[in-house]
Amino acid sequence: MIINKEYISSAGLRDSTFASHMALLKTLCLLGVIFSHAVYPFTEPDPDGFWSFFAERHSEAADFFIFWGEVVIIPSFMLASGSLAALSAERRRRGAPAYIADRAKRLLVPWFLLTVFWMVPLYTLFDIPAYNRPEGYTLAQTYSAGLEGLFTDHLWFLLVLFWVSVFFAALSPLANRLGGLLVPALALVAALLVNEYGRILTWYAVWETSGPLIWFGLGTVLFRYRDGIGKTLARHPLTLFGLNFVLFVVTALFAAQTTPIYWLTCCLGALTAFQACLYLARFHGRLRGFRPYRYFEDNAFRFYLFHIPGSYLTCRMLTAAGLSSPLPLMLLSFACNLCLTACIVAVFNILRKYLARKLSTKPR
């Protein structure tokens, strides 16, 4: 396996290509999230889980994908977010208040708007059961749970990403003065505290930040030391990828899954995806030449925002149509939901551009 020579220069990873490689990683992770939500209804029902809608027949293939996906997809996305946040901070040189305000605009505003105008109305209309939104909840009850940050569904990730971004932004002066490893070490301490005591903070997904603190911090470390990492990966690409992959599989299958071991497993899974996308970066230009992929990558965040509850509705419709075999039903549900979400995203983009023109028009 050979790394593209244009990707790694003698000085290390180029920032522009580093960002492109991370964009590829984030795009594939978001596609994996949408697929995960399409197959999750076919997993073994978990009464204590975050999802309460399950098909009549479950599939071992769905269980397999969810098992491996949960230790790769979200950690990889957090790793990429940490790396891109570090890249943005280095380029723009903004202070912590300006950075936090920007993150609030990009993360909290979509969370609020989607909760109020998308999630709560649709979940109430179709009476979709979810975590902290039991079947039979009224519109008022669902709004109460949503605005209190209890019923979040997939939007929990926006809240978690905001809290984690605030944590690292607040400590960025320490990183600049005392080195790049101190802040990730503090993130580990914070993760342990949240894991131990975070359950008392049930609102706005604060208690779910323990693992993301570590994975986001890992991304900042990869960016800070990208030159040395690039040189090392250039010398021993296959060996390092194979070693990391083996360690990941061993810890996932055979290690006692205590919280620290689970965090380590997720870090290894994220590093495996990081290395895989590093090798796939040479094909990114070709992928961008494929219009459906380019459209998804350019609108990946919007696909993530709008794809729920479409996964439930498409599953319900297909089941009502008489389909019962889990694997074809999963694939068809994913394809239908992807097409449905693409239509919603297209309408959203048209409305956004229309409103932008109207709001920017100066009165005569």
Image (cartoon, helix red, strand yellow):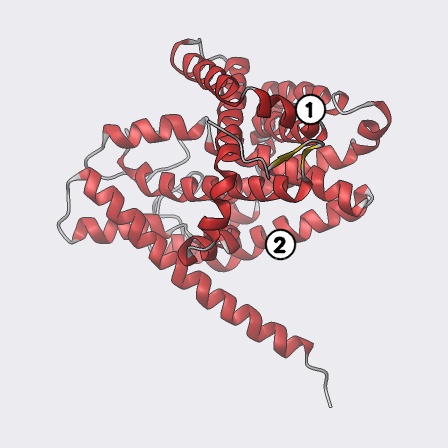
Quarter assignment of residue 230: top right
Q: What mark, if any, has residue 187 been given in the picture?
A: none
Residue situated in front as seen by the camera: 124 or 196: 196
Identified at 55% across, 14% down, the residue is: 260
The quarter of the picture where the C terminus appears is bottom right
Identified at 46% across, 41% down, the residue is: 28
Quarter assignment of residue 113: bottom right
Amino acid type indicated by mark 1: Gly
Q: Nearer the viewer, mark 1 or mark 2?
A: 1
Q: Position of residue 207 (x, y in %)?
A: 58, 30
Callout 1 secondary element: helix
Residue located beneath label 2 in the image? 109
Residue located beneath label 1 in the image? 228
Q: CA distance from mark 1 to mark 2?
A: 38 Å
Residue situated in front as seen by the camera: 347 or 314: 347
State whether residue 304 appears in this view: no
